[in-house]
Amino acid sequence: MEDTHSVKGLAHHFDDMEQQREAGTLGMWAFLITEIMFFGGLFMAYILYRSKYPEAFSSASGHLNWRLGAANTVVLIVSSLTMALAVYYSQTGNKRLLITMLVLTMILGATFLVVKGFEYHTKWVDHLIPGFGFEWHLAGDPQKVQMFYFIYFAMTGIHALHMVVGLGIMAVILRMAMKDRFTQTYHSPVEISGLYWHFVDIVWIFLFPLLYLLGAHEGH
Amino acid sequence: MEAIVDQPRVHYINKEYGVKSWLLTVDHKRIALLYLASVTLFFFLGGAFAVALRLELMTPQGDLMQAETYNRMFTMHGVVMVFFFLIPGIPAVLGNFLVPLMIGARDLAFPRLNLLSWYIYNVGAIFTLYAIISGGVDTGWTFYTPYSTTYSSSNVLLTGIGIFITGFSSILTGLNFIVTIHTMRAPGMTWFRLPLFIWSHYATSLIMILGTPVVAITVLLLALERIARVGIFDPALGGDPILFQHLFWFYSHPAVYIMVLPAMGVVSELIANFARKNIFGYKFVAFASMAIAVFGFLVWGHHMFTSSQSVYAGMIFSFLSFAVAIPSAVKVFNWTATLYKSSISYSTPLLYALGFIGLFTIGGMTGLFLAAAGLDIHVHDTYFVVAHFHYVMVGGTLMAYMGGLHYWWPKITGRMYPEGWAKFSALIIFVGFNLTFFPQFILGYQGMPRRYYAYPPEFQVLNVMSTAGASILGFGVLFPMVYFVWSMRYGKVPADNPWGAFGLEWQTSSPPPTENFKQTPVVTWEAYEFSPRDKMEILGLRGVEETKV
């Protein structure tokens, strides 16, 4: 029993690497299920009020910058690719490319957040922050439009928070990679963090059309 | 701590000393004890609020406190008991201690997350305590909108933050159990050899990871609405209060099963071991846990029969609520069938288990009254409801928790509790409990609404009975507190397996070493395999020693 515990990266309470990898992966999947339920409450609120106040929601959505949103969607999809490649290079033991891909993923993630920051700033300038001097002079009941922006900020804000956490995780993984912690038999942290990264991307894939493209057919 | 100095063997308690060795431990057994301390503290805090409520209700008029204070008292009683005692109670204390031991693992899959969950619990607890000390909260534990988002001037935000944070400790515990049960079972410990305690904790964990995030986002939206004054739930601002009720009960009804499923797991262990018999219909009891977890998610609308929920939705929710009774009844029948013609020894843990069966049956049956939409409209928000859920929460969960603590006390501390005192307090608790809550069924049926500080004089006799019962119940729970602490120093030192049980947790020494087992056990027997083994011992074919792994 003792000899198995000298294996690099194996925690004391696991029998072997396989068991440890399985536990880590299942743990992340279970965590992602809780995340789906967490976002689920917000999607529920969105569905309810979108069907209740279609005009206000469409008008409010038309005021979002769908070009920036679309650009960010592309950024995140590419970051998912680099993340998947990072996992691949960790499995094949290619340290140099693993590090490159992790850095690229982080740069893309940061790009997303910067673009999001610009969008938020525009909303601040246009007095579109719910509860803080909200003003609306276009079509639609201002109260209902404010509800759209409330949901918009809640959803994208929590998503952005997940991106920040993701960047933190990537920083830890990058550090581990640079310190040669990963081997061809021990690379599950990269895979498990990858699951998280892809999940956060997928949430955005849902958020983009639901929030940005509602009013698009009206020629905005 | 000095108490165990005379036992030279190294185990998880005496391996290391000092505050640091406890606060930074990743040993699931020590974390269970940390949880035991926190949870006990909150149990007595919640109990203190209950005392205040029952004292006020001794007389029809408001003499001890007025409406505002009373509203705060029942809210804080509910918040503390539900979120800080009942939900973490059995899983975080007994579950944390026993899940790895019962499946033959050295620890939970994520020991550091386990410790983190205790810290998260306490951070949430501090927020809630601060909210309580700085004026309390008066919305009821259900935080119904728009009162909670717009009109209440009490500490809704702070309490909400406390509950939001504590929810994550519950999620982490559930996640840890699921992964541990899936990946860390000892060789030979197949799914159908698992103790039923493990099955019920698995079902509980599913609810924890699926339900808790929903209440988290609900509380978050509530807090945001309160801060930004933008409508999500307040109809005056364009929001929908029924959305809040749906989201809240989507978690909070399954949360009832978070409280009672682990209790059912404990009772299965107690019944099997004190009847010296395999649980009748093991697979049915195991699957009943899973069925309760699944059905439990589909019945939340029965809390909303009097809201503006559609009548047809109400009918479906009513039907599904009746359906939950089936797996619950399967369990009760199977426990009873297990006891039939078995060799029962009436030790304290079994007394609690028998108490559980009786009280849970009453609590469950009255639940069916409430699931019937027509009758529910008559007794909605009356003391009938209060009595019903206390029969399930106190008569069910608390009874099982006490029974479990007694049963595993020698395993946890290496000391025996005093049997005479324990039996005496079990009796006191049973009598006190029934005297407290049975009159409330009658009060509710006669129309006394819940959550009022005053009532018409004709209700006084039953209310005085209830208060008298509550004082007996209060003394009943104080006794174990005293003799448990006493026994840690003066209790008898029992054998490693004082009950002669066959669960893996009893196959290691008591208290167990930090790594739980000297070597990984290999399981070759079924769960609760009492009969053949007992027979073989009588025939002299197999000694008790051989059963040790």
Image: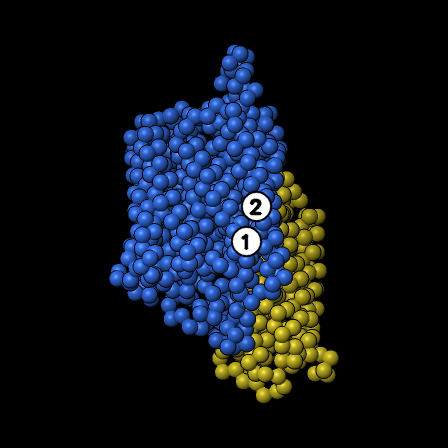
Chain colours: A yellow, B blue
What residue lies at 59% left-to-right and 25% top-to-bottom? B525
What residue lies at 39% left-to-right and 60% top-to-bottom? B451
Tell me the crowding category of disc 2: few under 14, some 14 to 19, or many 20 or more residues within 10 angstroms, Cα based. some
Q: Which mark is residue B371?
A: 1
Closer to the camera in the image, B275 or B114: B275
Q: Quadrant of residue A37?
A: bottom right
> Alpha carbon of mark 2 to alpha carbon of mark 1: how far?
10 Å
Outermost residue toward the top in this view: B540
Closer to the camera in the image, B345 or B290: B345
Identify the subunit bearing mark 1. B
Q: Give the mark nearest the N terminus, 2 or 1.
A: 2
Quarter of the figure that contains the N terminus of chain B: top left
Q: Amino acid at mark 1?
A: Ala
Tell me the crowding category of disc 1: few under 14, some 14 to 19, or many 20 or more residues within 10 angstroms, Cα based. many
Q: Is residue B85 above or below residue B136?
A: above
Q: Is residue B134 left or right of residue A153?
A: left
What residue lies at 58% left-to-right and 51% top-to-bottom? B321
Residue behind mark 2:
B325
At numbered mark 1, what does the secondary structure look like: helix, strand or loop?
A: helix
Circle 2/circle 1 CB separation < 8 Å? yes
At numbered mark 2, what does the secondary structure look like: helix, strand or loop?
A: helix
Q: Is residue A21 above or below residue B151?
A: above
